[in-house]
Amino acid sequence: MRMFGLFRKREMDHSQKVEAAYRRCNADERKGFFPEGVHQADIIIRSLAKIYGVSLDELDENGYCEILTSYTEAIIRKALPGSDDEVIVRGFQVRHGSLVRTIEIARRAFTYTMLNRMDHSFAIESEEDMLFLCKAAQSEHEKTSPKQGSMFVGEYCFEGPLEHAIYGKLYGTDDGFICWNSGNQYREQYRKGFQLVEEGKYDEAIEAYRASLEFNPIGISARFEICECFIRLKDFYSAKETLYAMTPYLLEPKHLAKFYRRLGYIGVEQGNDLCAAGCFVYSKNFEQNPGTEQELQNIFAKTGVQPSQIVGDPTIYLERYHIPVLKERKLSEL
C-alpha cells in the first residue's frame, strides 16, 4: 500500500500565505507597519500584486513575503534622515527586480505605500483605482522633474501625500495630472501669516494665509489659522464659514477633532455654552485633548451644569445648532 501522499505537505491557500508573510515580521514591526493587523497586510498584498502585474495564484509563501517586504522596506527608508523619494523608488527595482520590472511600476508601488500609510484601507481594486494611482505616481514624479506641456492641470505645494491625494480625488481630471511642486511658496506665505499673527496684525495675516492657498488649495493648516484669526477679530461668522469650507478635506481624526474644538471656542465666545459643550464632547470621538477637558470644566464652572450630564448624544446638539456631523472617512471614500 502506498501511503506517501498522506505525508505530502498541503498547499497553502491565500489566507494562510498572507498570515505566514505577516508573521515573518516580529510583534513590534507588525504593530508599526500594519496597525490594522493581518487584514491590512492582505489589502497591501492584493493591491501591490495588481501594481506589479503578478498573479497571486502563482506565488508561494515566499512570493507573498517579498511583496510585503517591498512595502515595509519603503517605509523604513522613507523614515531615514535625508531620505530621497527617487532613491527609494529606484530601490524597488534593485531589490525586487523579479516583481518591479519598470521604473513606472516602482513609482506606483511607492506612491501606493505612502497612501496606504495615510489610509490603512486604501486598496487597488478597480481600473478606476489604478488610474488614480497612475496619475498620483506620475504627479509625484513631476514634483522633482517637471515637464513642459499641457498635460498638467495644476502644480501645487502640498504639505504631504494625503493632501496631494485628496486634491487628486476631488479635483483631478481624466486628461491631466496634478503636479506636486517641491517649492516652498506655500510654507513661505504660511510663515509670513504666522509672523503677522505674532504682531497682532490679523487682517494682514488672513491675506497672507489666503495667498498661501494659491500654492496649496487644500492647505488644512492655513485654513485653521485663518479661522483662528477671525476668532481673534471677533468675526465669528467668517470663522465658521472658513471651517465649513474645509469639511471636504477633513479625513484624519486630529483634524476632525480640531474642527469641533474650534467650533466649541466660537460657541463659548458667542455665549452659547450648550452648543460649545456639544462640540467639545463630540471632538473627543476623534482625539483626547487636555484643552477640551479644561473648556468643559470652564463651562461647568460658569453654568453649574456638568456638560457630560446634559450632552448624552452630542450629535443632537450639533444638529440643533446646524453644525455638520462629520465622521472619520477613508481616502477611498472620497
Image (cartoon, rainbow, N blue to C red):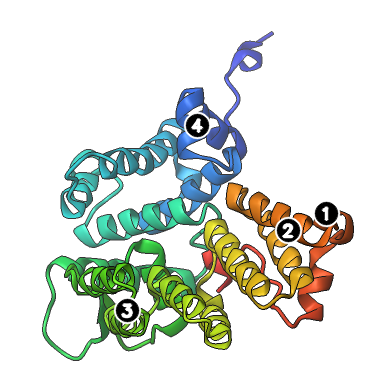
Cβ–Cβ below 8 Å for labels 1 and 2?
A: yes
Which is more N-terminal, label 3 or label 4?
4
Q: Identify the secondary structure beneath mark 3.
A: loop
Residue type at mark 1: give it: Ser
Residue type at mark 2: give it: Val
Question: What residue sits 54% from the left and 37% below the top?
Answer: 18
Report the residue that reaches farthest toward the bottom: 150
Q: Judge by depth and name the residue closer to the eye, 57 or 136.
A: 136
Which is more N-terminal, label 2 or label 1?
2
Residue 150, image x and y in percent? Answer: 19, 91
Residue 131, image x and y in percent? Answer: 40, 74
Q: What's the distance in space between the residues labelled 4 and 3, CA to CA?
A: 48 Å
Residue 176 visible: yes
Which is more N-terminal, label 2 or label 4?
4
| Residue that mark 3 sits on | 201
| Residue that mark 2 sits on | 281
Residue type at mark 4: give it: Arg
Question: What residue sits 33% from the left and 81% below the top?
Answer: 213
| Residue that mark 1 sits on | 308
- The label on residue 30 is 4
Q: What's the distance in space between the residues labelled 3 and 1, CA to CA?
A: 38 Å
Position of residue 287 relative to residue 329, above or below, is: above
Residue 10, image x and y in percent? Answer: 60, 25
- Which of discs 2 and 3 lies nearer the camera? The answer is 3
